[in-house]
């Protein structure tokens, strides 16, 4: 996940506060011929050993993205060779085409036997953020196994997904599996910076006239133990991502000596401006997004009076939002957030600087646009001596469908129920951060962010932090999940087939 990006955080917070959603829709019916030809997700002892060893090997290649410009390109190349070595069947199957995109990213095209079924895309990224060794129980690029878990940078974000995707496909192919529905696997090399790999893959597929039934990328998890006294695990599928804007604020005044200062200085003016921004939060947006649906559907899971409050979210909106505003994570779910991140001015104690600069990072709620947030910001600052420069910005991602007819969402639900029968709560959420999947909005309306992995609150700090690890059992389940998901996707059902029928 890109810097500051955790779908999970949004949910975690929400769950901490006992607000969530259950989806109890009917879902997909599994068709008969599909059940008959099903290959069970059962792996031999040798295969299970080989699959964890393959992940360890992947962790040992330091595919680090250091900054926007800098990455370990030697490691990126080595990783490309590594997947050839450990997944020979994937790389030598006649109906699979492999392409290297943007020098280091990988695109696999798996041709299904039934061209009438719309293809889908599974994606992940194999670059990781840096990992200084301090504080790690084992070296971060060792891939060492301790007490049933594999440690190392990338074990959760996101080499586990890269390896599980290819591993599941390899195991299916060894069992002579031939997919009916075509699909793509895209493995990005720079998600932690600009995502050029994913952008190129998207452009390439568009140039080939591809339209996708759905996309699955990293983002959500199975949240375990996030709500005190609520023992049920909850599968969170990210159906949207917040937008983002980095705004530079600048004040130019004449410089001067500190012995005879003017009434106002660039520093004072800018400080007042950013302080106003901090003191004036963006308006609460309650109705749009998944929140209201989620609250209503989740209500039954809770005792009185929480159930009554949650089942009437509109009525209790003031109460609910007041509650959510108190916690930074839940606050981030009901409004565009404003974060002051850089403040720069002055070089010498006795010189009044002419220029003061500040950067503000906004995370834009799906009910607003970049333009609206920019206008609001200018109105809040209300000082024409402050200049505004948008450094980078993009609008929030559209909300992908999560109803009974949403093929991607329902396939994920079906596969969750099969691989994790104890999980019977699945909720749609919004990622607070961003993923490579945001570059695919021209190819599909169904973009889902989900990692089939149990996450506990203490795991949150491991993302981009120390002692990142994945349990061996958890990784096997991830492989199993993809193994089943690919087979489930061979269903005849099309995403919009029943839309206009009675
Ligand atoms: C880059 O990766 C290679 C392995 O592919 C490794 O030997 C080298 O130490 C890495 N360089 C840095 C600066 O991490
Ligand atoms: C403000 O100062 C900076 C740095 O000296 C300069 O580049 C910029 O053009 C100035 N802007 C205005 C509007 O005076
Ligand atoms: C959820 O799963 C538990 C078992 O873990 C089961 O007892 C319960 O009835 C299920 N609830 C629903 C609504 O399916």
Image (cartoon, grey):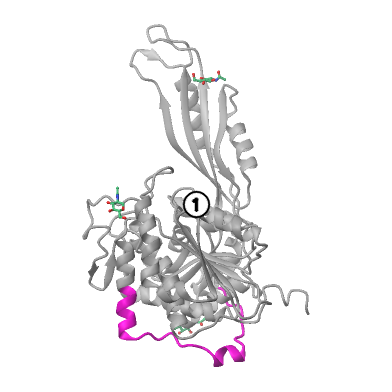
On the image, the x and y values in percent for residue 397 come to 60, 54
For the point 39% across and 44% down, the residue is 70
Residue 394: x and y in percent read 58, 46
Query: Does the magenta segment cover residue 402?
Result: no
For the point 64% across and 75% down, the residue is 404
Residue 288 picture quarter: bottom right
Q: Quadrant of residue 117?
A: bottom right
Q: Position of residue 398 (x, y in %)?
A: 63, 57
Horizontal arrangement in the rendering, residue 173 relative to residue 114 (left or right): left
Looking at the picture, tell me which residue is in the foreground, 246 or 199.
199
Identity of the residue furthest to the top in this view: 260
Residue 228 visible within the image: no
Q: From this view, report whether residue 178 is shown above or below residue 207.
A: below
Label 1 neighbour load within 10 Å: few <14, some 14-19, many 20+:
many
Q: Quadrant of the C terminus?
A: bottom right
Q: Which residue is mark 1?
A: 195
Q: Which residues are magenta?
A: 23-52
Q: Quadrant of the N terminus?
A: bottom left
Classify mark 1: helix, strand or loop.
loop
The response on whether ligand 1 sits within 8 Å of label 1 is: no
7 or 117, nearer to the observer? 117
Q: Is residue 83 left or right of residue 276?
A: left
Question: Is residue 134 visible to us here?
Answer: yes
Residue 370 location, quadrant: top right
């Amino acid at each position: 996940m890109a810097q500051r990006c955790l779908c999970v955080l949004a949910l975690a917070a929400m769950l901490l506060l006992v607000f969530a959603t259950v989806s109890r829709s009917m879902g997909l019916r599994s068709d008969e011929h599909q059940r008959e030809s099903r290959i069970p997700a059962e792996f031999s002892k040798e295969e299970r050993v080989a699959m964890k060893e393959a992940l360890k090997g992947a962790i040992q290649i330091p595919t680090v993205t250091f900054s926007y410009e800098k990455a370990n390109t030697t490691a990126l190349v080595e990783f490309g060779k590594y997947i050839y070595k450990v997944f020979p069947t994937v790389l030598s199957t006649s109906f699979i085409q492999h392409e290297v995109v943007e020098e280091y990213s990988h695109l696999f095209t798996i041709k299904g036997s039934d061209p009438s079924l719309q293809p889908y895309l599974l994606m992940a990224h194999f670059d990781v953020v840096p990992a200084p060794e301090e504080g790690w129980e084992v070296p971060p690029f060792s891939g060492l196994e301790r007490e049933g878990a594999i440690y190392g940078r990338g074990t959760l974000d996101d080499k586990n997904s890269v390896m599980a995707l290819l591993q599941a496909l390899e195991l299916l192919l060894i069992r002579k599996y031939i997919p009916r529905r075509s699909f793509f696997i895209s493995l990005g090399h720079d998600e932690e910076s600009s995502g050029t790999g994913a952008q190129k893959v998207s452009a390439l597929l568009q140039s080939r006239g591809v339209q996708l039934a759905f996309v699955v990328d990293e983002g959500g998890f199975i949240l375990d133990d996030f709500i005190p006294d609520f023992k049920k695990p909850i599968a969170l599928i990210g159906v949207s991502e917040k937008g983002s804007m980095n705004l530079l604020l600048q004040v130019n005044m004449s410089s001067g000596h500190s012995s005879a200062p003017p009434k106002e200085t660039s520093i004072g003016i800018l400080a007042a401006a950013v302080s106003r921004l901090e003191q004036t939060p963006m308006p609460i947006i309650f109705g749009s997004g998944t929140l209201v649906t989620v609250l209503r559907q989740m209500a039954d899971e809770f005792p009185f009076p929480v159930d009554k409050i949650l089942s009437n979210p509109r009525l209790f909106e003031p109460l609910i939002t007041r509650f959510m505003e108190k916690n930074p994570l839940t606050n981030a779910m009901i409004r565009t957030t404003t974060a002051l991140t850089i403040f720069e001015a002055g070089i010498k104690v006795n010189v009044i600087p002419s220029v003061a600069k500040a950067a503000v990072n906004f995370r834009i709620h799906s009910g607003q646009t970049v333009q609206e947030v920019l206008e609001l910001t200018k109105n809040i600052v209300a000082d024409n001596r402050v200049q505004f420069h948008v450094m980078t910005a993009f609008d929030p991602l559209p909300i992908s469908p999560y109803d009974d007819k949403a093929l991607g969402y329902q396939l994920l639900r079906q596969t969750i129920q099969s691989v994790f029968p104890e999980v019977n709560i699945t909720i749609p959420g919004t990622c607070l951060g961003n993923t490579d999947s945001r570059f695919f909005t021209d190819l599909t309306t169904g973009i889902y962010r989900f990692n089939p992995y149990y996450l506990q609150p203490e795991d949150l700090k491991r993302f981009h932090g120390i002692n990142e690890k994945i349990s061996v059992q958890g990784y096997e389940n991830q492989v199993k999940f993809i193994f089943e998901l690919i087979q489930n996707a061979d269903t005849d059902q099309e995403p919009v087939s029943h839309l206009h029928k009675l």
